[in-house]
Image: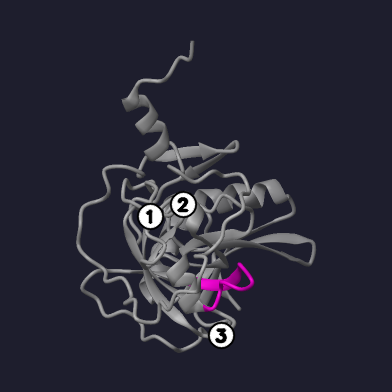
Amino acid sequence: MRHSLPPLLVLFFLLVAGCSTRSPFPERDRGPDQPVDVSHVPDAVPQKVPPSRYGNPDSYTVLGKTYHVLRDARGFRQRGLASWYGMKFHGRRTSSGERYDMYAMTAAHKTLPLPTWVRVTNLENGRSVVVKVNDRGPFHDGRIIDLSYAAAAKLGVLARGTAPVEIVALTPGEEAPKRGHPVIAGSGRYLQAGAFASLPNARSLQRRIERRHAFPVEIRRENGLHKVVVGPLEAAADIETLSRTLQEWGIASPHLVQ
């Protein structure tokens, strides 16, 4: 005789403990059987809404890796690879509890609050869209966001499956950056938070900053040192906020770098 889990327990694991319906393991996916024109699909529009009831635990673990969900997306900016998901998950529940619609302008992210609206810019062709983040993923090394079929099509990501992008969180009521202009590599300022001979020590500071702030953090290997660099930081207020945090931690000399 088969024994099943209580329905509420199943719902908890599906919607809160990680990616609700999407497996973290590689699976084959595809678009519709016939190409669909999504050029008429409008961008998502940022709205002032309460956080999703589901999908926003303080942290969750997938494949042995723990992710800490951000409490606030303001100022969030990140670069990395985007991928997309389609028919395999069309109509299934997302981590927020909404149904996944591959023809809507949505996306999945590992740590942004649900929902969050972000502008995604393809760094290869300059195309840009606004999507609503309502799901968790992608749980694949090197990828930072999973786009819906429609969003991927408008960004020119479908054929290759992945593309380098920049994502910027949008605040409802504020004017979003204009579409169609490529992001200039190297724009913004970078703050070096520390330099270590030990890579584990550098990673420890990187994780500490990521838990406290929504700024992108990277480790650069230069002259035998592992340098923890935060950025790009577009606003002077962001630099001041981060510098204050580092000083609270006893790091007295953060400085701007290229």
Disc 2: which residue: 89
Q: Position of residue 174 (x, y in %)?
A: 24, 76
- How far apart marks 3 and 1 lie (CA) works out to 27 Å
Would residue 30 appear left or right of 178 to someone viewing this image? right
Crowding near the residue tagged with mark 1, few <14, some 14–19, many ≥20 C-alpha atoms within 10 Å: many
The amino acid at mark 1 is Tyr
Q: Position of residue 217 (x, y in %)?
A: 55, 61
Crowding near the residue tagged with mark 2, few <14, some 14–19, many ≥20 C-alpha atoms within 10 Å: some
The stretch of residues the image draws in magenta is: 156-167
Which residue does the image show at 39% across and 51% down from the upper left? 70
Q: Tell me the element at label 2.
A: helix
Using the image, determine if residue 94 lies above or below residue 175: above
Q: Tell me the element at label 1.
A: loop
Which one is in front, 101 or 250? 101
Mark linked to residue 205? none
The amino acid at mark 3 is Asn
Crowding near the residue tagged with mark 3, few <14, some 14–19, many ≥20 C-alpha atoms within 10 Å: some
The amino acid at mark 2 is Phe
Which one is in front, 5 or 132? 5
Which residue does the image show at 43% across and 36% down from the upper left? 17
**Residue, far top:** 1
Q: Tell me the element at label 3.
A: loop
Specify the quadrant of the image occupied by residue 24: top right
Q: Are marks 3 and 2 in contact (CB under 8 Å)?
A: no
Mark linked to residue 100? 1
Disc 3: which residue: 125
- How far apart marks 1 and 2 lie (CA) works out to 7 Å
